[in-house]
Amino acid sequence: MPNFSYDEKLLLIQHCIYKYDSEEILKEKLKGYFSHKDIESAIDTLIATQKIRRIGQDVLQNNESHTGTISEIPENLRSIVDNL
């Protein structure tokens, strides 16, 4: 598994939510990059800081109406999002 900073993990997950809004699918796609515990922790942090929100049981959505637009994703992370 690649070594990412915590902020990179959060940003990567936010950008992946654009591609996969289902929490289960998102976890499945990211398991090659992060442990299940890291994914859960990052999602919980993003929800607690209101950067993403849970809609229903399995749907995640970026909370841009609350936080504004998401930061641009660096090139080293863009390839991961593109390949998921």
Image: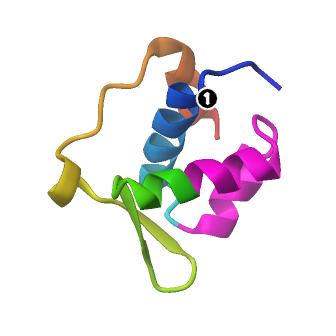
Q: Nearer the viewer, residue 20 or 13?
A: 13
Q: Is residue 40 magenta?
A: yes
**Residue at horizontal 65%, vertical 21%?**
4
Residue 22 picture location, percent across and down:
57, 68
Left or right relative to 62: residue 83? right
Regarding mark 1 in the picture, which secondary structure is present there?
Answer: helix
- Amino acid identity at mark 1: Ile
Left or right relative to 38: residue 16? left
Considering the image in quadrants, where does the N terminus appear? top right
Query: In this view of the protein, can residue 82 be seen by the observer?
Result: no
Residue 58 picture location, percent across and down:
57, 78
Bounds of the magenta span? 22-43
What secondary structure predominates along the stretch shown in magenta? Answer: helix
Considering the image in quadrants, where does the C terminus appear? top right
Write down the quadrant of residue 26 in the picture: bottom right
- Quick check: 74 above or below 58? above
Write down the quadrant of residue 62 in the picture: bottom left
**Residue at horizontal 21%, vertical 49%?**
67
- Quick check: 38 above or below 62? above
Left or right relative to 78: residue 23? right
- Quick check: 84 above or below 79? below
Q: Does the magenta stretch include residue 16?
A: no
Residue 5 picture location, percent across and down:
60, 21
Disc 1 designates what residue? 80
Q: Residues within 10 Å of mark 1 (few under 14, many from 20)?
A: few
Left or right relative to 53: residue 79? right
Residue 72 picture location, percent across and down:
32, 25
**Residue at horizontal 34%, vertical 58%?**
50
Query: In this view of the protein, can residue 21 be seen by the observer?
Result: yes
